[in-house]
């Protein structure tokens, strides 16, 4: 296994070990921080992803974007 693959594996294991409440809290904070950024406010379109395996969930951002 290459060092890049090893690092991916370690980081994935660490992310999977995070508490769901912690991930939700951090995700919420990130969404609100993003809403305060001028490039986000001024954007005509924004690329997004669907979270999996414990990734940050920015889906709530899209409920909030039409309000700005």
Image (spheres, rainbow, N blue to C red):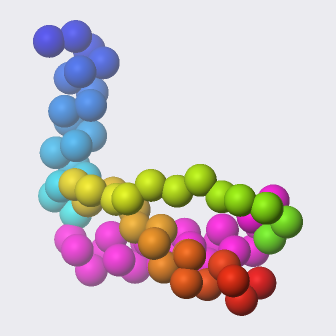
User: Is residue 63 visible in the rendered structure shown here?
Assistant: yes
Tell me if 64 is positioned left or right of 22 in this view: right
Looking at the rendered image, the quarter that the C terminus falls into is bottom right
* Location of residue 13 (image quadrant): top left
The residue furthest front is 44
Vertical position of residue 56 compared to residue 20: above or below = above
- Picture coordinates of residue 33, whole percent (x, y): 65, 72
Residue at the image position 38 percent from the left and 59 percent from the top: 50
Q: How many marks?
A: 0
- Asked if the magenta segment contains residue 16, the reply would be no
Of the pair 51 and 37, the residue shown nearer to us: 51
Tell me if 22 is positioned left or right of 67 in this view: left
- Main SS of residues in magenta: helix
Residue at the image position 66 percent from the left and 58 percent from the top: 46
Residue at the image position 26 percent from the left and 14 percent from the top: 3
Residue at the image position 30 percent from the left and 18 percent from the top: 4
- Picture coordinates of residue 60, whole percent (x, y): 48, 79
Tell me which segment is drawn in magenta: 19-40
* Location of residue 45 (image quadrant): bottom right
Tell me if 9 is positioned left or right of 49 in this view: left
- Asked if the magenta segment contains residue 32, the reply would be yes
Looking at the rendered image, the quarter that the N terminus falls into is top left
- Picture coordinates of residue 65, whole percent (x, y): 66, 79
The residue furthest top is 2
User: Is residue 38 visible in the rendered structure shown here?
Assistant: no
């Amino acid at each position: 296994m290459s060092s890049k693959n090893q690092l991916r594996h370690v980081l994935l294991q660490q992310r999977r070990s995070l508490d769901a409440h912690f991930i939700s809290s951090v995700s919420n904070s990130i969404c609100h921080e993003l809403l305060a950024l001028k490039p986000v406010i001024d954007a005509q379109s924004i690329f997004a992803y669907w979270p999996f395996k414990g990734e940050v969930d920015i889906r709530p951002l899209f409920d909030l974007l039409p309000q700005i």
